[in-house]
């Protein structure tokens, strides 16, 4: 089932400002849609409105073509998974998973069928008769998922379901969730502030800031063509390098004059309108080339080198003190305290209007 938000606004009582402003979004059938953004931007508020746990101040919420604004949560055919798994400690895993069906007074045989089915998918068959305190964090997370699955909902709503797990387990559960989604095909709306989760799991990312949608698209779109400086800086780890400058005779000249970039054909047209104006150039850390085979080069005083295995991250400064982050393959030799020369891939430079923050072409 698809979920549509039309001009949705949310104002909490006692707050001056709207927490969500004019949200327009369509989550398509079977999609895995990730709502991403910094803490406090309104992700949980949005999810709770879809679930019916928060009232809607303005606009329309549609499931299919049915307006849902006033429909009670229990009649929405959704299941929500929270960050805190909210399991009942005195009940067994089986009873926890069965809970909503038991409350609905479903037939025992149907409950058993659903719980066994979910347990099988989640590989929890052997843990059905123990208490939540006797299983690991990852397994508890699976129970919380199982509890949502047995209801056979039309939509899964998940609010940072992996954030209580350690890094290894989180990676593992990420893959499990994607597999589960492939298997069940249930429309899923998943909230996180972790861009890696968003990039790896989403078929569509909705990136928000301060109650406003900044960009909607596939992970690739947001990474390759960020619409504005906020998206450019938020997506990617380490972050994109942003250098302030202006356009002079068609070239980008950084404020300190240390970087002089001749834009390629791709960018030249769009930059024409910005002659003499303040523009920022964005370069992803992995788009630098050691030695500088691209022609234009500049020197970086590298002070810290982080070895991450498959990549090395270099933290350094240009001669004027402007900080740069450069990512290179892990087997390249770099050491802190040295000066190195780099070139960059001209095609991979992103230009932004400093006044509006918007991407230029
Ligand atoms: N019940 C409430 N009453 C008033 N203000 C609220 C209420 N719930 C949330 N807010 C405010 O709304 C804004 C958005 O909160 P929300 O919990 O939706 O953010 P979030 O994106 O989920 O953040 P996080 O990543 O920290 O979970 C915050 O400024 C928060 O203080
Ligand atoms: Mg939240």
Image (cartoon, grey):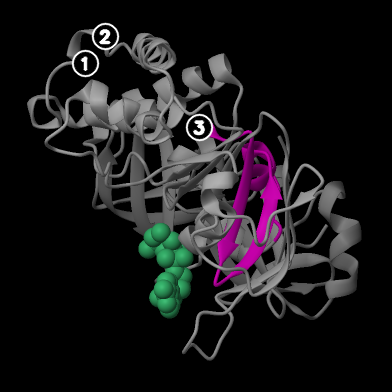
> Is residue 277 depicted above or below 292 in this figure?
below
- Say if disc 1 is inside 8 Å of ligand 2: no
Image spot of residue 155 (x, y percent): 59, 36
Local SS, label 1: loop
Contact (CB < 8 A) between labels 1 and 2?
Answer: yes
Instruction: Please rate how many residues cluster around mark 1, counting C-alpha atoms within 10 Å: few if below 14, some from 14 to 19, many from 20.
Output: some
Magenta stretch bounds: 200-227
Contact (CB < 8 A) between labels 3 and 2?
Answer: no
Which of pointers 1 and 3 lies earlier in the amino acid sequence? 1
Number of the front mark, 1 or 3: 1
Per the image, the residue denoted by label 2 is: 125
Q: Quadrant of residue 10?
A: bottom right
Asked whether residue 38 is in view, the answer is no
Residue under the point 32% across and 47% down: 83
Contact (CB < 8 A) between labels 1 and 3?
Answer: no
Q: Which mark is residue 200?
A: 3
Name the image quarter holding the N terminus: top right
Which of pointers 3 and 2 lies earlier in the amino acid sequence? 2
Per the image, the residue denoted by label 1 is: 128
Q: CA distance from mark 1 to mark 2?
A: 6 Å
Q: Is residue 194 left or right of residue 201?
A: left
Local SS, label 3: helix
> Is residue 299 depicted above or below 93 in this figure?
below
Image spot of residue 12 (x, y percent): 51, 79
Q: Is residue 34 left or right of residue 275?
A: left
Instruction: Please rate how many residues cluster around mark 2, counting C-alpha atoms within 10 Å: few if below 14, some from 14 to 19, many from 20.
Output: some
> Is residue 13 depicted above or below 275 in this figure?
below
Check if residue 225 falls in the magenta segment. Answer: yes
Name the image quarter holding the C terminus: bottom right
Image spot of residue 126 (x, y percent): 20, 8
Taking depth in this image into account, of 74 and 173 the one nearest to the observer is 74
Asked whether residue 60 is in view, the answer is yes
């Amino acid at each position: 089932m698809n979920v549509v938000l039309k001009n949705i606004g949310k104002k909490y009582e006692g707050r001056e400002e709207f927490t969500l402003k004019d949200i327009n979004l369509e989550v398509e059938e079977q999609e895995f849609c990730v709502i991403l953004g910094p803490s406090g931007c309104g992700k949980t508020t949005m999810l709770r409105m879809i679930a019916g746990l928060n009232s809607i101040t303005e606009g329309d919420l549609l499931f299919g073509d049915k307006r849902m604004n006033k429909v009670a949560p229990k009649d929405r055919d959704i299941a929500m998974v929270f960050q805190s798994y909210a399991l009942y400690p005195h009940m067994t895993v089986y009873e926890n998973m069965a809970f909503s069906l038991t409350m609905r007074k479903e037939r025992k045989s149907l409950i058993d069928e659903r719980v066994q089915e979910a347990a099988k998918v989640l590989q929890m068959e052997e843990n059905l008769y123990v208490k939540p305190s006797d299983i690991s964090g990852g397994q508890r997370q699976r129970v919380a998922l199982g509890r949502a699955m047995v209801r056979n909902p039309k939509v899964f709503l998940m609010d940072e379901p992996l954030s209580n797990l350690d890094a290894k387990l989180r990676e593992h559960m990420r893959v499990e969730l994607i597999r589960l989604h492939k298997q069940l095909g249930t429309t899923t709306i998943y909230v996180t502030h972790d861009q890696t989760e968003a990039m790896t799991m989403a078929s569509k990312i909705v990136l928000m800031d301060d109650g406003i949608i900044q960009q909607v698209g596939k992970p690739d779109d947001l990474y390759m063509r960020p619409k504005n400086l906020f998206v450019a800086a938020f997506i990617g780890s380490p972050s994109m390098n942003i250098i302030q400058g202006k356009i002079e005779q068609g070239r980008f000249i950084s404020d300190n004059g240390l970087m002089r970039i001749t834009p390629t054909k791709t960018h030249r047209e769009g930059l024409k309108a910005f002659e003499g104006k303040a523009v920022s150039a964005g370069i992803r850390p992995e788009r630098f080339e050691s030695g500088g085979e691209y022609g234009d080069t500049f020197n970086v005083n590298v002070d810290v080198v982080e070895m991450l295995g498959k990549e090395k991250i270099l933290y350094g400064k240009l001669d004027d003190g402007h900080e740069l982050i450069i990512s290179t393959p892990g087997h390249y030799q770099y050491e802190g305290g040295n000066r190195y020369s780099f070139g960059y891939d001209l095609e991979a430079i992103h230009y932004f209007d400093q006044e509006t923050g918007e991407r230029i072409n």
